[in-house]
Structure formats: structure tokens, C-alpha cells
Image (tube, rainbow, N blue to C red):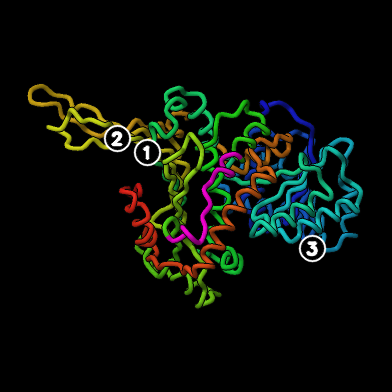
């Protein structure tokens, strides 16, 4: 990973500049980078979409975006610098001749062209071909690709092949915003900078690991996209597997991109296949029904606006993962993710093995395992759950569970906190691929996820119902109960 060094100015072109991703995330993140003075003075932001805007229309869109989603007062001085960078072009992305308009605003000699594809993946090929036809690309040019990159291994390869006809692999930045989160990056420091964990991070000391990504939201207008995708492909294939690789990979030789990517790929290759023979024992599909969220009645999945009443798409998935290598032999890793869950929560819980002998039976009949709890959102931080003696004299020693709590917001009060998109946009402009995904990594993940999808289809496994506002189907409890374990609630 590169230091906070200066970098060559960019022409950052956002394709789909008027869409939700741009207005809710990208324009907000760029403003925060501007406020922190992390963007080179000569860098420009060029919005592209198919809608006509009046003069200064894109600046007005950006202002409205900040007013709606920034959650802080807009600084007028920062806004003046930020808005001065902006330009807008109306281009129909399916019409290759229209990309020639970029020649009038791009300066490839002075600035690096960074193309951010904030559009549906079926347009990726058109954009790459249009840029190639316009003859504005150089060896320094880059392309940033948003997920989903396909909906299975076959479609993923087709998209990547189309991009590869125009861009070399080292010019392609595949983004997963979870990899920009402070707590995900802190996994590297936690594991590889602290001997207490580095020497106790294997099957000898760890009993099992749980990774939960719970969402309170339902479909919220994304029915057409989500119903064709499902929670397995939308969340587990990327976010959860990325967290899994960080928590289980071997120590990389360095913090360079190639070293980290190599170790993550090894983990994905070691995932035990899930097939029709074992899919019913190690996976659970679910679909939410009507229920209550924070006291308010909410509809079920098939009752959402525009829903297909007969849909069998899953909004919840839980999986037992086994990694067939020396470090993790016999250590199950349980993944779960769902919509309309009891609350919004993303966390990793590492359960250490129980002690073989208990000398405190008089006060604590059974010693619970120590736990390392890593909170990714909404609260960011790390907790260690352990036993301590209750102060006092006389009688036997009495134990009590306590937590060592490292809250990021409390511990690092004077340090700026950024979201995943701020960091990754900045790294794309710098040209550092460390926190982005390699093609081989994504293909390996898709191959494993496709086998689950195929096994569900072969076994005709339908989603099990769960009430909105719960933690998923009862079957997900049984998934762990069969192993004598329970979800962290």
C-alpha cells in the first residue's frame, strides 16, 4: 500500500453520474476527500449520463446530493473548490461514436484518465469499446468496475474478456467497498502485527468463526435486480467471502497487492466444495415474510411493490464453510447474511477453544470460551470477552465475564474516519491495486458460489420462511446446533 504521497492529477469520469450509486455514494465521498485536501488540485470530475442537463446542471445535482446524504454542514469554501472541478457530458453509452465528445475535455498528457463504471455491467463492453474507438486511452488509463460483475462464472468471464480487449489487467480496478472499511483493513494489523493473535490463529486454539452481515432493509425498489440475483450472489459471493479471506489467509510476504491477492486466492481454492451431496446439511436458504421492524409492520418479500408472488429467490442465506488446509482443518466457519434482519450488524466473532480443565467449578460450573468480536458496522471496534475475578475477600473466587473494548470512535477521536468508497476512490486515482480484486480471485469465488446455486437447483431446495425482524429461519439455528454451537446474538 502506498503512503499518502502526491499523485498525478486525474480526469475522473463517472459513467452513470446521475444514478443512485453516484449521487448517494461517489459524489459524497469525493466531497469528503476534497474537504481533507486529498485530491490533487488539477484533478477534474466529469459526469456522463444519457440525460440532458442545463448549464451547471451537474453541479446542482451534486449540491442536492450533498444536502440529502452528507450528514454534515456543507463547507462553502470546500464546495467552491469541489464544484469548480465538475463538467458534464450527455452520452448514450450504447452509441460508440458519441464517446468522441471526451476528446474535448480529456487531457491525457497532463492527467490520468480514470473511468468509473457506475452502471449496469451489460454496459461495460460498450464503454470500453467506445473509449477505444475515441482513441483517448493511454497506458496510464484505468477502469474501475462496480459489482455485480456478472451473475455467475460464465457471465463474469464474458464481461472480463470484453474489458481485457481494451485494458490490461493492471489497469483494471474491481471494487468491493467492504475492502475500504477501517475495520476490515484492521484485520491485517490485528493478525499480523500482534503476536498474541499471530501465534494463536489456527486449529489448535480456535474452535470456530462466525461472520454475520445483517441488513434491516428489504428490497426498497430493487426488486427487478434482486429477484434475479438473490442474497447468495448479491452479498455472500463478494462481501462475506472477502471478509473470510482476510480473516483466514496466510501471512502475505508484504503489503503489496500481488502478495495479498495471492494469499486470498489460496483460501478460495481451499474452500471445501458444496454439492448436491452435502448442500442440505451445510446451507440454509430463507425468504422473509411479513413482520415488524422497530414496531412498524413491514410486508413480506413477495408482498413488496412489483413483486412476483411465486418468487423462490432467497433473501437470507447461511452456510457452514470448511477450509481444507493445515491451518483451518476441523475449524468450521459459519456465514450468514439476510435482509429484514432484527438489526443492522456486520461482525466477525472468533470463538477460542474451551480450557480442558476447570479449577473454578465452585463459582463457575463451566468456563465459557474467550471470544474476539470484530465490529464492522454500525459500531466499529474490537472486543475481547474474557473472565476476571470479582473483587472481594472471603469465600471462594468468583468469576465474571468482562469485555476489553476498543471502540474506534473513542480511541481515535482525533483521527478522521472515512467510509469504504472514499478510500477506494482515492486508491484508484493513485493507481494502487492492493484493495481491489484480481480477476482470478473473483472467478474462484464465483466457481464456489455457482456450485451452491447448482446444488440448490438439483435438490429443488426452496427458501424457508422467516419473519421480518427476526434473525432468519429456524433452520439456520439448527445449522449450528448440529455441531453443538449457537449464533452470537
Q: Which mark is residue 207?
A: 1
Residue 307 spot, x, y in % from top left: 53, 74
Could you tell me which secondary element the residue under label 1 belongs to? strand
Find the residue positioned furthest to the left: 394
Could you tell me which secondary element the residue under label 2 belongs to? loop
- Magenta region includes residue 277: yes
Kindly report the distance in space between the C-alpha atoms of the residues bearing marks 2 and 1: 8 Å
Which residue occupies the foreground of this view, 457 or 231?
457
Kindly report the distance in space between the C-alpha atoms of the residues bearing marks 3 and 2: 64 Å
Circle 1 residues within 10 Å: few <14, some 14–19, many ≥20: some
Q: Nearer the viewer, mark 1 or mark 3?
A: 1
Please determine whether, in this image, residue 195 is positioned above or below residue 270.
above
Q: Residue at x 67, y 53 (%)?
A: 22
Q: Residue at x 90, y 49 (%)?
A: 103
Corner quadrant of residue 226: bottom right
Over which residues does the magenta segment extend?
266-280
Please determine whether, in this image, residue 175 is positioned above or below residue 254.
below
Residue that numbered label 3 is attached to: 52
Tell me if label 1 and label 3 are in contact, CB under 8 Å.
no
- Magenta region includes residue 403: no
Q: Residue at x 74, y 50 (%)?
A: 14
Residue 99 seen in render: yes
Q: Residue at x 70, y 54 (%)?
A: 118
Upstream in sequence: badge 1 or badge 3: 3
Circle 3 residues within 10 Å: few <14, some 14–19, many ≥20: few
Kindly report the distance in space between the C-alpha atoms of the residues bearing marks 1 and 3: 58 Å
Residue that numbered label 2 is attached to: 354
Looking at the rendering, in which quadrant would you find the N terminus? top right
Which residue occupies the foreground of this view, 398 or 367?
367
Corner quadrant of residue 478: bottom left
Tell me if label 3 and label 2 are in contact, CB under 8 Å.
no
Residue 417 spot, x, y in % from top left: 54, 36
Amino acid at each position: 500500500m502506498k503512503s499518502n504521497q502526491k499523485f498525478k492529477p486525474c480526469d475522473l469520469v463517472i459513467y452513470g453520474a446521475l444514478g443512485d450509486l453516484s449521487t448517494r455514494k461517489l459524489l459524497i465521498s469525493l466531497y469528503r476527500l476534497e474537504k481533507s485536501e486529498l485530491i490533487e488540485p488539477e484533478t477534474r470530475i466529469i459526469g456522463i449520463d444519457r440525460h440532458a442537463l442545463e448549464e451547471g446542471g451537474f453541479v446542482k445535482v451534486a449540491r442536492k446530493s450533498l444536502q440529502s446524504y452528507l450528514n454534515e454542514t456543507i463547507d462553502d469554501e470546500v464546495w467552491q473548490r469541489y464544484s469548480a472541478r465538475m463538467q458534464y457530458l450527455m452520452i448514450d453509452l450504447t452509441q460508440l461514436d458519441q464517446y468522441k465528445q471526451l476528446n474535448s475535455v480529456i487531457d491525457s498528457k497532463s492527467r490520468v484518465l480514470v473511468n468509473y463504471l457506475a452502471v449496469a455491467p451489460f454496459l461495460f463492453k460498450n464503454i470500453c469499446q467506445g473509449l477505444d474507438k475515441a482513441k483517448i486511452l493511454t497506458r496510464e488509463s484505468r477502469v474501475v468496475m462496480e459489482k455485480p460483475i456478472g451473475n455467475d462464472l460464465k457471465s463474469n468471464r464474458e464481461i472480463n474478456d470484453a474489458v481485457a480487449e481494451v485494458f490490461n489487467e493492471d489497469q483494471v480496478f474491481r471494487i468491493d467497498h467492504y475492502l475500504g472499511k477501517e475495520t476490515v483493513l484492521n484485520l491485517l494489523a490485528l493478525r499480523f502485527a500482534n503476536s498474541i493473535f499471530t501465534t494463536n490463529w489456527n486449529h489448535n486454539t480456535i474452535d470456530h468463526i462466525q461472520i454475520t452481515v445483517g441488513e434491516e432493509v428489504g428490497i426498497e425498489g430493487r426488486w427487478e435486480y434482486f429477484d434475479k440475483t438473490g442474497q447468495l450472489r448479491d452479498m455472500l459471493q463478494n462481501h462475506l467471502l472477502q471478509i473470510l479471506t482476510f480473516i483466514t489467509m496466510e501471512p502475505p510476504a508484504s503489503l503489496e497487492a500481488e502478495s495479498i491477492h495471492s494469499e486470498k486466492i489460496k483460501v478460495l481454492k481451499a474452500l471445501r466444495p458444496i454439492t448436491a451431496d452435502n448442500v442440505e446439511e451445510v446451507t440454509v436458504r430463507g425468504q422473509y415474510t411479513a413482520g415488524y421492524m422497530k414496531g412498524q409492520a413491514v410486508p413480506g418479500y413477495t408482498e413488496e411493490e412489483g413483486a412476483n408472488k411465486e418468487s423462490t429467490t432467497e433473501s437470507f442465506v447461511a452456510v457452514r464453510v470448511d477450509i481444507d488446509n493445515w491451518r483451518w482443518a476441523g475449524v468450521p466457519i459459519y456465514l450468514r447474511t439476510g435482509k429484514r434482519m432484527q438489526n443492522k450488524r456486520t461482525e466477525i466473532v472468533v470463538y477460542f477453544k474451551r480450557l480442558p480443565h476447570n479449577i473454578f467449578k465452585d463459582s463457575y460450573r463451566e468456563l465459557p470460551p474467550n471470544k474476539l468480536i470484530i465490529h464492522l458496522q454500525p459500531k466499529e471496534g474490537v472486543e475481547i470477552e474474557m473472565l476476571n475475578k470479582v473483587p472481594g475477600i472471603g469465600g471462594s473466587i468468583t468469576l465474571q465475564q468482562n469485555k476489553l473494548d476498543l471502540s474506534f470512535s473513542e480511541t481515535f477521536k482525533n483521527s478522521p474516519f472515512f467510509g469504504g468508497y472514499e478510500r477506494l476512490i482515492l486508491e484508484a486515482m493513485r493507481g494502487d491495486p492492493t484493495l481491489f480484486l484480481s480477476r482470478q480471485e473473483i472467478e474462484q469465488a464465483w466457481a464456489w458460489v455457482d456450485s451452491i446455486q447448482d446444488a440448490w437447483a438439483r435438490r429443488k431446495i426452496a427458501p424457508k420462511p422467516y419473519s421480518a425482524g427476526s434473525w432468519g429461519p429456524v433452520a439456520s439455528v439448527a445449522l449450528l446446533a448440529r455441531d453443538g454451537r449457537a449464533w452470537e446474538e
